[in-house]
Image (cartoon, rainbow, N blue to C red):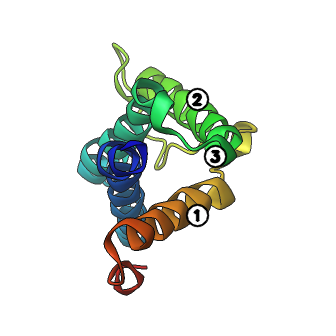
Amino acid sequence: GWKEQAVSELLGPVYMQLDRTESAFVRWRDQNFYLEAKVIGEGNRTIRDLLLEKGHLIPPALLKDAGELIEHYDYWLEMYESKRLAESPDLKTKFIFAGPQGYPFPRASAQRFQETFLSLWNELYGSGAEEIG
């Protein structure tokens, strides 16, 4: 029912995008517009859109976390579009970070989403998810 739908349509995809963007940040040493646009940008937009479109699948305990993630991603996307997609893009700024403007990445919120995915996966399908985490 609801748990299976939440795992397959929201929590699993959010888990994968969080993992993807985290890996990209680890690789992000120098200015890399491809990594920024294709991995970070697409991942940020996908997570934000999933949370907004699949809000009915967010476990109540994660609603505040979802709001914090959405707020961060909204601001990051606003900065990204104004600096990189403007008529005269800012190519001097090495990285787009929302944290210094008061919208840091809510790491604890992301972690709670990932932990909830693993917990519900184990509850629904048995062991195996602990190998993911």
> Do residues under tags 1 and 2 come within 8 Å of each other at their CB atoms?
no
> Do residues under tags 1 and 3 come within 8 Å of each other at their CB atoms?
no
* SS of the residue under disc 1: helix
Compare marks 1 and 2 and give the one earlier in the sequence: 2
Is 15 drawn above or below residue 10 in the view shown?
Answer: below
Point out residue 69 in the picture as x, y percentages from the top left corner: 59, 41
**In-image side of 48 versus 125 (left or right):** right
C-alpha span from label 1 to label 3: 11 Å
Q: Which mark is residue 62?
A: 3
Q: Which mark is residue 98?
A: none
- State the quadrant of the C terminus: bottom left
C-alpha span from label 2 to label 3: 20 Å
Q: Which mark is residue 111?
A: 1
Residue pictured at 37% horizontal, 53% vertical: 7
Report which residue position mark 2 lands on: 75
Give the residue type at disc 3.
Leu
Local crowd size for mark 3, using a 10 Å CA cut-off: few (<14), some (14–19), many (≥20): some
Point out residue 67 in the picture as x, y percentages from the top left corner: 64, 34
Compare marks 2 and 3 and give the one earlier in the sequence: 3
Which of the 4 image quadrants contains residue 41? Answer: top left
**In-image side of 95 versus 63 (left or right):** left
Compare marks 1 and 3 and give the one earlier in the sequence: 3
- State the quadrant of the N terminus: top left
Residue pictured at 24% horizontal, 45% vertical: 38
